[in-house]
Amino acid sequence: MTEQMKLKISGSPHLKNKAKTPHIMLDVIIGLLPVIGASIYFFGFSALILICNCTVTAIVTERFINLIRKRKSTIRDYSAALTGILVALILPPSISWYGATIGTVFAILVGKHLFGGLGSNIFNPALVGRAFLAAAYPKALTTYVKPGWSDTVSEATPLMLQKFSGESTSLGQLFLGNVSGSLGETSALCLLIGGFYLLIRRSAGWRIPVSLLFLVTVISTGGYLVKPGLGSPLFHLLSGGMLLGAFFMATDPVTTPTTKKGKFIFGGACAVLIMVIRYFSNLPEGVMYAILFTNATVPLINRYTRPKSFGLRREDEANI
Amino acid sequence: MLKVAEHKAPQDSLETEKFLSAQKLYLPVSQHTGRPSRICVEKNQIVEKNQLIARGDGLISASLHAPQKAKIVDIKNWYHPKLKKIQSLILKTQPETENREPLPALLNLDKTSKENLLKTISENGIVGMGGAGFPSHVKLNPPKKIDTLIINGCECEPYLASDCRLMIENLEGILKGIEIISKLIAPEKIIFAVEGNKKEAIKKINLFLHTKKNNSKIELRVLKSRYPQGGEKQLIYSVTQRKLSGKMLPFDAGCMVHNVATCYAIYKAVYFNQPLTSRVVTFCGDALVKPKNLWVNIGTTLSELVEKEIIKFKKIPKKIIFGGPMMGDAVTNLANPILKTTSGVLFLEKLPKEEEESACIRCGRCVNYCPMNLVPLEYAKMAKNKKYQGLKSYYIKDCIECGSCSYICPANIPILDYIKLGKEKIK
């Protein structure tokens, strides 16, 4: 028996944790299921078609680029599928099918692979896709429809109403999601369920969403006390892309800092930018640009928050 | 720190058996940290049991003794689980001649001077048995005042149960060993640190501390089971909240850590003049019919244990690891001998699925779990791109090689392998 023994040699450790990249991506997709469900419930069958369109486009584009770059297929890590779903969820339900397709191709091609593919991209690919569409088709990206299955009646989003005409939306409606907006951002309830799923499964870190939402609460409370017309803290937390951004966009591991301290700073910076844009700019919503902008500062954040080696004091550091 | 699946059952409840009659013994001259021992016997010489066969050479070194009466049949390079082949004494054992005079032992601890105690410990070749094998007589003569003595009964590596069994079966010896250490360094506090998964051992220690009218200063500290809590720096932090940087040694923080097996070996050395020639080793893994804890002589090879059916295979092992699965060393064959520092040998048939290294997604899990607060992903990236010079500014030398980063990495990147490569390159 011992003669047939062929022993494998490898460096320690000889045990490995089971959670791998595909599991993490798949977990995020599972976390998005309630959101997807809500979008279909509120916007009808067309929402499902839009999501499928973007997902399939993302996967096909990924595979195509793999072939051009002569790399092994990376569609099985589910990152492309996830990007596709996310692109769909941040688009208005009324967008044309080709608009969504172009946005998705741009997200995967430019947002992800031009930077070197998974792990090397600087900006969140889904947001890059949307930013591109917002620049290329500004009208399509600012036209939102009333929730409903049959008739498409255009209606302003709660943030637009609040900003441009000072109308408030009931918090109950915002919480459940029966308001106009992008596919995946309307139902705060479903976003919270998905977000907590990610945190419990530890597929997303808690530091970024916690620091982001906390600082938004602080700033919007201050704003509300100074000028109630700016909207209540709860309104800001529940409206627009806040929760979708905090739980599913700002937690993308690739485009966020790797250090613990850096994650807090990243979340805080996003929060400040979101509120600056919401309060002072001509745009009703700022989550997308805030996250994209903060993505660009990640190398800097990583550099300045590099942890000190265990037990090292400041005076020791000078001697190294 | 990590929570790793423990795999301690059932070996943690199996009585230790004995196998102290190997036919051949292979004793490498380096089973400790420091200079290899200098051989002081010749080929074909007959040596008695417990006779010195290689002397500790230099300031940091340890002596080596014959575990059984034997003939030195050869002195040549032989397998060593941690190093390449190194010089080893090969002994063919002979039946024990009866009525052998026992060596004189120290009978009265109170009347023995510190120097004599240290000498006894040094002459009996005691080294740290938790894995590093640092010569105990050197450690026990620290240049600074020690206020806290920590007894390490953590055994945080999965699978291993040898320390656990020793605490259950030989607690009195361990406590006497602690008494000797405490006489040597006179600490203000003695903390016996055990991880919570060793319930039986904890019960025994508590029983001793509460029932006996003991005036010992020993204090039991039950810690959560985490990896790598048994590491010196991590344990000192868990117990005293004192942080030791990469370059500091425990005495810099007024601490000293001794493994329970070392305490027991010190007790045997001082009370019985028994050199360190045998130890408890856990043999386990899914390739074995059943796991075993065994008192075994150092130098015994795995092949002899297999031939004598002391350990029986259920399946052909695909990997054999000396030590625990997190920091242990995979070996190429059964000719490797048990060393003073071998706390267990794993025989694994089912290995984790081999998955190809994929792109780092920068999730930062390695950063979160690094017990030394390092940035492992940066090391892997730099080593991969051959930018070794950059590694210097990232405290790579402080890495304790616990492997938490490689364990947790979702992209299957062998981060620790890259770190070892990087360390080698910037030496």
Image (cartoon, coloured by chain):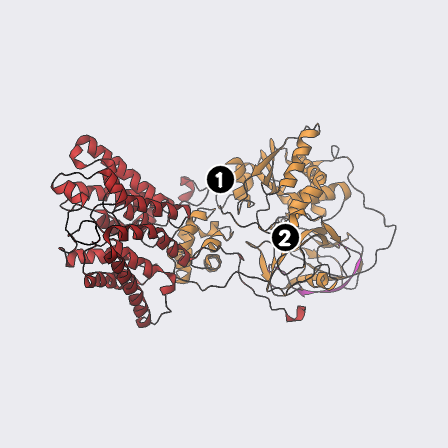
- Asked if labels 1 and 2 touch by Cβ distance under 8 angstroms, the answer is no
> Given the current orientation, which residue lies at the most extreme left position?
A165
x%, y% of residue B106?
A: 77, 39
Give the residue at mark 2.
Answer: B32
> What is the crowding at mark 2: few (fewer than 14 residues within 10 Å), some, or many (at least 20)?
many
Which residue is denoted by mark 1 in the rendering?
A: B243
Q: Colour of chain A?
A: red
Q: Is residue B68 magenta?
A: yes
Q: Of A32 and B282, which appears nearest the observer?
A: A32
Question: What range of the chain is rendered magenta?
Answer: B67-84
Q: Amino acid at mark 1?
A: Lys
Q: Which of these two is toward me, A54 or B380?
A: A54
Is residue A245 shown left or right of residue A28? left
Residue A270: say if magenta.
Answer: no
Residue B14, given in percent of the width and then of the height, sits at 69, 49
Mark seen at residue B26: none
Q: Is residue B265 left or right of residue A105?
A: right
Q: Residue furthest right?
A: B99
Q: Chain of mark 1?
A: B
- Residue B232: % across, % down: 55, 44
Chain B rendering hue: orange
Q: CA distance from mark 2 to mark 1?
A: 26 Å
